[in-house]
Amino acid sequence: MNSSEPLILGIETSCDETGIGIVRGRELLSNALASSVDLHARFGGVVPEIASRAHLEAILPTIDLACDQAGVSLRDIDAIAVTAGPGLVGALIVGVASAKALALGLGKPMYGVNHLAAHVMVDELEHGPLPEPVIGLLVSGGHSSLIKVSGGDFESLGQTLDDAAGEAFDKVARLLGLPFPGGPMIDEAAQSGDRHAIDFPRALRTDPVHAFNFSFSGLKTAVARWVKEQQRLGNTISVPNVAASVQEAIADILTSKAIAAAVNQNAPHLVIAGGVAANSRLRTLAAERCAEAGIELRVPSPGLCTDNGAMVAALGSHLVRIGGAPSPVDFPATSTLPVSEVFF
Ligand code: KG4
Ligand code: ZN
């Protein structure tokens, strides 16, 4: 460990995971997580008020756990980074208020940072400095976008026009009677399915106006129609085949547009980030297609793809490294923060 590098504590509370990570430079020291996912399961989606209350209960014990695992005390921390948006506003407020209290109490600088940029920057903890320019395929429960990272700036190239990729996984899983969150369930069911069994639509595949945009709401409708038709015909529905075919449609459209963006922007590096980047078929297909196209692919380990505190600490560490000015004490929790606003 290079002890001359600053020690950064990252706080993530934008959705249903209370994540606290500690990094020194680009070295991950701890990544403690308390999830309220089980409390939301019976509602089929995250209930904001339940998530906020769970963050309140979990935040102090999770900070203690992260410090214990890293073998540091709060007094050793050089700067605090916290997700300021986008996300559920009540959930964000818990992290932002805690970060402000810690920063003021410890007399340390703090950075209110962008959750989406943090999803991308976490890759530096495993694979070293991000090359520039790099294309980011950011796919989570709330977002699906293609971004270009260059000179420390995050520029949006395109995004979903309706549902996010993770949302599509979650909604299709619900249709198939699989529990929330559906992405990992579809991934698991698809292992024993035939991905060529059903040819589900790939929206906006050849639309030049929407070359870097996505649309997933029609996919959910197509699956619902297909299931209904099979039921009408009295056919047995193979959940593994539907799961594998839907997963193939999503992975196909995401990878083909990401590679097109890399070629178009002359950026031979692609990083896939966000919860959906944990998907096994997306990872395999991206690796195959990037190898064919001569593009370097970087994907964090599955545990760093879903929401966590280390990603926030990684972005905070980057901001300290480049000499970014700390955020003012009155920066707000902002539910709709665009990816171009990396920090306050
Ligand atoms: O980034 P994330 O943890 O939270 C948000 O910021 O939204 O992403 C959560 C999303 C959920 O929709 C979940 O179903 C999806 O990521 N997800 C997956 C997998 N693991 C998580 N989707 C497909 N395959 C997976 N293995
Ligand atoms: Zn996320």
Image (cartoon, rainbow, N blue to C red):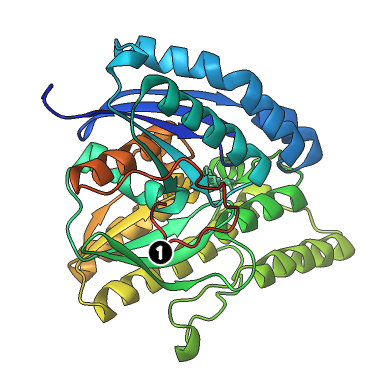
Q: Position of residue 119 (x, y in %)?
A: 40, 47
According to the picture, the residue beneath numbered tag 1 turns out to be: 340
Q: Position of residue 250 (x, y in %)?
A: 52, 63
Relative placement, left or right, of 327 versus 24 is right
Q: Is residue 207 visible?
A: no
Q: Within 8 Å of ligand 2, the CB of disc 1?
A: no
Does 232 appear above or below 161? Answer: above
The residue drawn where x is 65% and y is 19% is: 57
Q: Position of residue 181 (x, y in %)?
A: 64, 41
The residue drawn where x is 34% and y is 34% is: 109
Q: Secondary structure at mark 1?
A: loop
> Which residue type carries mark 1?
Ser
Image quadrant holding the N terminus, namely top left
Q: Please tell me which residue lies in front, 42 or 206.
A: 42
Q: Please tell me which residue lies in front, 11 or 270.
A: 11
Relative placement, left or right, of 102 versus 232 is left
